[in-house]
Each structure stands twice: as C-alpha cells, then as structure tokens.
Amino acid sequence: MGLYEGQVLPRVLNVACGSKMVEPLRRRVCNGLAGDVVEIGFGSGLNIPFYPAAVTRVAAVEPSDLGWQLAGQRLKAARVPVQRSGLDGQSLPFEDGSYDAALSTWTLCTIPDVAAALREVRRVLKPGGTLHFLEHGLAPDENVRRWQRRLNPLQQRLFGGCNFTRSIADLLTAAGFTIHELDVFYQEGAPKFAGADSLGTAVSP
C-alpha cells in the first residue's frame, strides 16, 4: 500500500463509515448472525457493537494494519472473540465449510477480483450458510447510473479502487448464492450516485 491508502484512507473511512446515520443499517445487516462468523473487509471494526449475542466468534479479514489499530477500543469492548485471521478476501486462509455465516459491509465495491472473493466466501461457508451483506453499487435508476459511470474513475482513484458500478445482486447470483432477502434503496443523507445500497442475505447451497 502507498502512503495515502495505508495511512490516510483508513482514517477517512473510519470517520465516514462511522456516521451515526448508518448505525441502523449496520444493526439490520448484523441481525440474525449466529455461530462462527467470517467478516470480510472488517475495516476499523464498526460492526462490532452490532454483533448479536448468538455469535460465538468472528474471524476478521482486513488488509490494513491501521484499520485494525483503529478498531482497538471496539475490540476491547467486544462481547464475542474477534481475531484478525486473514488479509485478502480473494484468498481466505480457512478450510472448506468452516463458518456458519459471513458478513460484508461496503466491501464488495473495492475488492479487485470480487468474483473470486465471493467464491471464497461460498467455499468457507457450511452448506446452507448465510452471507449478510450491506453494499453500495449500481443504482436502480438509469439517470443515476449515468452519473455513476462518469464519476467511477475518480471514485476509484480517491477511495482505494472503490466502484459505483457493480451490481451486487448479479455478483451474488453469479457466484452461486441464492438471494434470500434483498432491500435496494438510496441511503439517507448520501448522494444517490454514492448511496445506492443493497442490504440482505444470500444462502450458500
């Protein structure tokens, strides 16, 4: 990682993604998690306060050392054990079928080979395991999509490869998941081109 991505961007994301306005969304996406959970794109641990009591442990996959450091106080207050267990969502260091559930929040937009990452999540989930996701991506309206396509190159440069133009539902189904619940909406307080969110659950066969 360069200086910006290694030292600046994690701090920016910790503040921007730590807004009180998104806490209800984090609570929604974490609802129903249980057992052993793998979280890809753990970041600075902003989901920790919303892990349900039914979660027994969390394997945190996060490439940024600074992100992990910024999670320090949340980790100390965590009600369940959380261990940094991997650096790359595209290559998870876990055995097949070893997790009950997976969690991804505002992560699939940035992973370079997102298809590989979703295949890895499917691989490490037990049969019938559930991926809980909250992601921004391609908007449902064409007029917003036009702006997303125009702004995507700048977004990628400023935010570590983040994309506005990925269709979350299509990515999940292409990876073999069955979408169980899906809510597509514009996030309150965010411009539509950046806040076209998909929140739901998808099941691994």
Image (cartoon, rainbow, N blue to C red):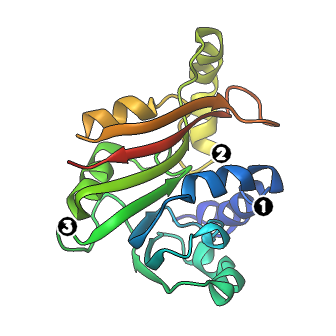
Front disc: 3 or 2: 3
Rendering coords of residue 110 (x, y %): 49, 47
Q: Secondary structure at mark 2?
A: helix
Residue at the image point whose x is 71% and y is 55% from the top:
17
- From the image, state whether disc 2 or disc 1 is nearer to you: 1
In the displayed structure, does residue 171 sit left or right of residue 8? left
The kind of secondary structure element at disc 3 is: loop
Is 71 drawn above or below residue 178 in the view shown? below
* Amino acid beneath label 1: Val
As measured in the structure, the alpha-carbon distance from the residue carrying label 2 to the one carrying label 1 is 15 Å
State the residue lying farthest toward the bottom.
Answer: 76
Give the amino acid type for the residue marked by disc 3 in the picture.
Gly
Q: Is residue 74 above or below residue 150?
A: below
The first of marks 3 and 1 along the sequence is 1
Closer to us: 168 or 91: 168
Residue matched to label 2: 158
Estimate how packed mark 2 is, as few (under 14), some (14 to 19) or many (20 or more) residues with alpha carbons within 10 Å.
few
Q: Are marks 3 and 1 in contact (CB under 8 Å)?
A: no
Q: Is residue 112 left or right of residue 153?
A: left
In this figure, which residue is indicated by the disc labeled 3? 97
Residue lying at the far left in this picture: please name it.
Answer: 96
Q: Position of residue 21 (x, y in %)?
A: 81, 50
Of marks 2 and 1, which one's residue comes earlier in the chain?
1
The image's mark for residue 108 is none
**Crowd around label 1: few <14 · some 14–19 · many ≥20 (10 Å):** few
The residue pinned by badge 1 equals 15
Mark 2 and mark 1 in contact? Answer it, CB < 8 Å.
no
Q: Residue at x 75, y 60 (%)?
A: 18
